[in-house]
């Protein structure tokens, strides 16, 4: 990151514009810097309650839940697609996991079942989008409604509480100090995804599809394979998040996962991934997940009326995008991509 | 028979064929589920299920018609915010009409904010309206302090509950006039020409002298106004302003109606008749499930299935029609 120097010779819009452009060029670095400052301020002004082990661990577990789907959603959006079915996939997968536990299926098998359930839901989206040529937002909207109904039908309005405490131990309690193993595992997954996206050929194809699908297809790139891969991946990672969520609050109800989608989309967007595809990074989304969690923590720690939570997050989304990406998007306007 | 239908009325069949088929299936299904669904007295009540959704679908369709990946998610926030404001004002003994106008004004203001950021700064609508969805519904929660407001005078219920000769006021005096107005705006006016051209090809529109930005901006304002109106109609029916009403789920339903109604998500293409028919599909579905005491979430699942059937069916019809043309 280049050193930003502001010489206040005369105040004017030109300087502000120049500063903004520099911030935009280094968006991810800027976001990271802002977050470090926010963390320091929060640590200094909350009389230690922000850094208390228990509150840190709660935040880390929250982040572990959101990070997986956020990584998957980043890959989906990079292809120029979208997946709005995340919350419903969590709901149906959680019912599956809960039922399996209730019927005494072996622990490891349930974990695999949870991952497989998510991946299958992702595969169904892929089938509709790649095979059926249905626009991603419509296809995932449809499967979202279907999974929600299925989970409700399976649960019959009841709660499943037969979740073994060993799941909670693995996902939320054990770890290194305040750092739960679950977050470390998800961070490792995130790092592999980042490596895959930057270094592996299929990762580059994902970017190429988002930049110009027709060109990618004409160049003989495996467009279909890349698309199937991103939707199955987000399904798999949503399956992982489901297991973490069920471990975090060991009960499966029709409400499980219902609030998960918007914070995840917000994290990806604030992390600098272009909604029209082709531009963005896994690292940015990681920082986005951190920012969403910081907002939640700040609202609690400063005893703000919790209803302000949404307002603050909304303002942050818009401001982050205006500052970080405003100028980049002006070029993409009118391309008609969703 | 099919071939003849296609040759004579190809456009209409391709556009409405699947939708009409789905509507018939849904009506038969509804009648089977709850045999009283089609009784005249129930038909009138049924429409109150569809009016708020139908109003929001008109606004959403106009925004999407403008193209460029435009979508308005914030209606899920204005839908609760407007009645919360109205309830607050009426609770402070502000004149009823003034409170309603103020609440509609909030919808317009919300639409203006969306439009200014999306069109003025050129930021994708899905992100901006996601942010304002959070913002508006958060404001509704803050203002109502998280509880349902019921400080409406009895006369406020007239809009949502009143009937004339058995027909609900909200259908007669709100939905039908607005359908005509929206039909004029979206299909017959100069604005219709502008927004359809903008949605189909913004560059061509710009070169033909259409003010692309102002055209798109207006769609957001109308969408905000209609979302506020929908919220007021619903709260007048139940005499309650709930800050947690709406939300992303309502947006999903509205977008489902718009897509089911044949509006092209990439802009430029769509008809008011299609949206009215799609609203009817969801309305019949919702009402008959409600009558049969079935869980409304099952209706949600069926909606998802219908959405897939409609998309695949429409694609199939288009392909069939192309093959028919090639063979003749």
Image: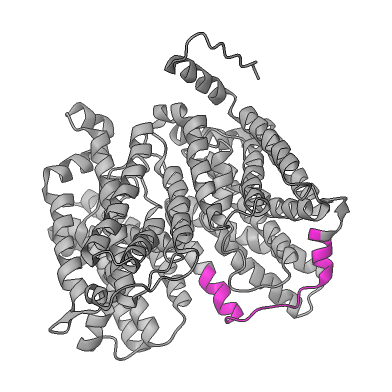
B91 is higher (above) or lower (below) than B62: below
A27 is higher (above) or lower (below) than B282: above
Q: Quadrant of the N terminus of chain A?
A: top right
Residue A142 quadrant: bottom left
The residue located at (40%, 52%) in the rendering is: B74
Let me know if residue A164 is in the magenta part. yes
B204 is higher (above) or lower (below) than A309: above
The residue located at (47%, 75%) in the rendering is: B297
Horizontal placement of A29 versus A179: left or right?
left
Residue B282, given in percent of the width and then of the height, sits at 33, 71
Horizontal placement of A223 versus B34: left or right?
right
The residue located at (70%, 50%) in the rendering is: A63
A36 is higher (above) or lower (below) than B92: above
Q: Of residues B132 and B178, which is closer to you in this image?
A: B132
Q: Of residues B125 and B322, which is closer to you in this image?
A: B125
Magenta span covers which residues? A148-172
Residue B179, given in percent of the width and then of the height, sits at 18, 62
Residue A269 quadrant: top right
Horizontal placement of B232 versus B209: left or right?
right
Horizontal placement of A276 versus B203: left or right?
right
Question: Magenta residues: mostly which secondary structure?
Answer: helix
Q: Of residues A37 and B18, which is closer to you in this image?
A: A37
Spot the residue most to the top.
Answer: A9
**Is residue A81 visible in the rendered structure shown here?**
no
Let me know if residue B295 is in the magenta part. no
């Amino acid at each position: 990151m280049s050193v930003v120097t502001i010489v206040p010779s005369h105040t004017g819009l030109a300087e502000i514009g120049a500063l903004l452009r520099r911030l935009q060029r280094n968006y991810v670095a800027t976001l990271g810097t802002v977050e470090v400052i926010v963390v320091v301020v929060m640590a200094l002004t909350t009389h230690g309650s922000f850094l208390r082990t228990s509150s840190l661990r709660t935040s880390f577990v929250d982040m572990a839940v959101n990070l997986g789907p956020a990584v998957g959603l980043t890959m989906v959006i990079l292809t120029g697609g979208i997946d709005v079915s995340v919350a419903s996939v969590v709901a149906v997968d959680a019912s599956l996991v809960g039922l399996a536990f209730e019927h005494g299926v072996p622990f490891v098998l349930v974990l695999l079942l949870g991952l497989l359930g998510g991946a299958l839901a992702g595969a169904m989206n892929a089938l509709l989008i790649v095979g059926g040529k249905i626009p991603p937002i419509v296809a995932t909207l449809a499967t979202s409604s279907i999974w929600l109904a299925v989970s409700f039908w399976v649960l019959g309005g009841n709660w499943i509480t037969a979740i073994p405490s060993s799941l909670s131990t693995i996902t939320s309690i054990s770890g290194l100090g305040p750092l739960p193993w679950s977050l470390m595992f998800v961070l490792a997954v995130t790092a592999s995804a980042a490596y895959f996206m930057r270094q592996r050929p299929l990762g580059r194809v994902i970017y190429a599809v988002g930049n110009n699908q027709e060109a990618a297809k004409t160049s003989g790139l495996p467009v279909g394979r890349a698309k199937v891969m991103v939707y199955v991946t987000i399904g798999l990672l949503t399956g992982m998040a489901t297991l973490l969520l069920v471990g975090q609050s060991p009960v499966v109800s029709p409400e499980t996962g219902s609030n998960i989608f918007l914070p995840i989309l917000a994290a990806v967007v604030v992390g600098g991934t272009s909604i029209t595809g082709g531009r963005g990074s896994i690292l940015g989304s990681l920082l986005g997940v951190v920012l969403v969690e910081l907002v939640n923590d700040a609202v609690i720690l400063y005893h703000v009326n919790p209803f302000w939570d949404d307002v603050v997050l909304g303002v942050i989304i818009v401001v982050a995008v205006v500052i970080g990406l405003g100028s980049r998007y002006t070029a993409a306007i009118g391309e008609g991509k969703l | 028979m099919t071939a003849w239908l296609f040759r004579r009325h190809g456009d209409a069949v391709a556009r409405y064929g699947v939708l009409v088929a789905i509507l018939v299936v849904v009506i038969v299904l509804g009648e089977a589920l709850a045999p009283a669904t089609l009784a005249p007295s129930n038909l009138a009540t049924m429409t109150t299920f569809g009016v708020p959704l139908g109003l929001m679908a008109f606004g959403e369709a106009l925004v999407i018609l403008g193209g460029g990946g435009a979508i308005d998610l914030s209606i899920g926030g204005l839908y609760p915010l407007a009645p919360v404001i109205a309830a607050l004002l009426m609770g402070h003994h502000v004149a009823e009409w003034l409170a309603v106008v103020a609440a509609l004004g909030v919808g317009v203001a919300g639409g203006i904010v969306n439009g200014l950021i999306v069109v003025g700064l050129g930021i994708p609508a899905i992100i901006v309206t996601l942010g304002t969805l959070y913002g508006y519904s958060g404001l509704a929660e803050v203002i109502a302090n998280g509880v349902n407001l019921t400080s409406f005078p009895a006369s406020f219920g007239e809009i949502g509950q009143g009937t004339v000769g058995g027909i609900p006021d909200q259908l007669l005096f709100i939905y039908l006039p607005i359908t005509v107005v929206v039909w004029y705006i979206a299909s017959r006016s100069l604005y219709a020409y502008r927004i359809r051209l903008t949605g189909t090809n913004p560059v061509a529109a710009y070169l033909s002298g259409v003010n692309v930005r102002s055209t798109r901006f207006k769609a957001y304002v109308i969408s905000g106004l209609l979302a506020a109106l929908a919220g007021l109609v619903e709260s007048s029916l139940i005499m309650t302003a709930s800050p947690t009403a709406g939300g992303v789920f309502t947006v999903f339903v509205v977008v489902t109606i718009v897509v089911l109604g044949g509006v092209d998500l990439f802009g430029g293409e769509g008809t008011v008749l299609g949206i009215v028919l799609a609203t009817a599909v969801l309305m019949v579905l919702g009402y008959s499930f409600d009558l049969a005491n079935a869980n409304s979430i099952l209706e949600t699942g069926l909606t998802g299935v219908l959405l897939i059937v409609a998309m695949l069916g429409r694609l199939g019809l288009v392909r069939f029609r192309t093959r028919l043309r090639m063979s003749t």
